[in-house]
Image (cartoon, grey):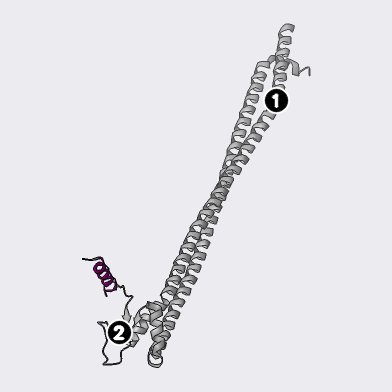
Amino acid sequence: MEALLPFLGKHWKEIAIALLLFVVSFFWWQDHNGLVNAYDASVESYETRIKDLKESYKRETERKEAALEEYQEKMENLEDEYSEYKNNIVEVKSERIQELVRLRMENPRQLIAEIEERFHFEYIE
Amino acid sequence: MSILNKILFLLCLVHSPYASASEGRFTLVPQGGIVPFEATCFDTEATAKLLTWKEFLKQEEQKQCEFEKRTLVLDYDLVMENLQITLDETHARTQIEIETRDKELEELRNIIKKNKKLNVPFIIGTSVAVGFGVGFGTYHFASK
């Protein structure tokens, strides 16, 4: 202690400057560290956001594609159903034509009645 | 012209062939037969086709109408579903933006808090050191 005091008394200015430099450096380091942490937090936040947004867009595309597929499937079923009906009605009409042709030969009175009923024409003997 | 003549003239007009609107006439004619009125003649097959067309016309139109209606409903449903998906995902994206920004702000606040916390003791320590130095220096000069 006896040796230290004269040393401190002799070099107190240098020691004070060194202490000041240390304190300034420490605060500078602390500020820098804070900025780096803030930057890291922002980067992490952006990365999380980008990842989640990408997932959201992907999910949206997938959902829309699924909806479109479902629509196409339903439309195909509907068209098949209608096409089947049209094919069926062609057959039914063909059979009905044959039936009416037979009716002309076998029971003309009934054919007359049908024409009257359908078209409201007047039958002339 | 007397009133009686006028009435008779009107009655003639009413009963004339032009005044009575006929729905149309038809007859069944054997081959080589004579039709008692001016006509357009169809054979049995053509007549059967006309009858059948008339018979199924309503049903076919109904079916076509139903098909068109169901197609429109499907189109509309698809548009609505797409809009709903867009709405859902836009909502989700807005939530993501809000949540990540909140989190980022919270982290920044913590960093600021931490810096403030650390500053106080070091300022005190520095003040003590500087005070000690100034005191020691003064003592040193005074003792000289």
Same chain for labels 2 and 1? Say yes or no: yes
Asked if one can make out residue B144 in the rendered structure from this viewpoint, the answer is no
Q: Give the residue at x 63% y 27%.
A: A27
Q: Is residue B14 magenta?
A: yes
The quarter of the picture where the N terminus of chain A appears is: top right
Q: Amino acid at mark 1?
A: Val
Please tell me how crowded label 2 is: few (under 14), some (14-19), or many (20+) other residues with Cα within 10 Å: few
Q: Give the residue at x 67% y 28%.
A: B116
Q: Looking at the picture, how far across and down is residue B40, in whole percent?
A: 27, 82
Q: Nearer the viewer, residue B70 or B7?
A: B7
State the extent of the magenta-drawn residues as a range: B3-16
Q: In the rendered view, does B140 fall on the left or right side of B52?
A: right
Q: Chain of mark 2?
A: B
Q: Chain of mark 1?
A: B
Asked if one can make out residue B79 in the rendered structure from this viewpoint, the answer is yes
Q: Give the residue at x 69% y 14%.
A: A10
Q: Nearer the viewer, residue B141 or A42?
A: A42
Q: Is residue A79 magenta?
A: no
Q: Looking at the picture, how far across and down is residue B120, in whole percent?
A: 70, 25
SS of the residue at dot 2? Answer: loop
Q: From the viewer's perspective, is residue A7 above or below residue A98?
A: above
Mark 2 or 1, nearer chain start? 2
Q: Which residue is mark 1?
A: B120
Q: Which residue is mark 2?
A: B42
Q: Give the residue at x 51% y 59%.
A: A64
Q: Looking at the picture, how far across and down is residue B62, in whole percent?
A: 45, 70
Say which of marks 2 and 1 sits in front. Answer: 2
Q: In the rendered view, does A12 fall on the left or right side of B50?
A: right
Q: In the rendered view, does A52 fall on the left or right side of B141?
A: left
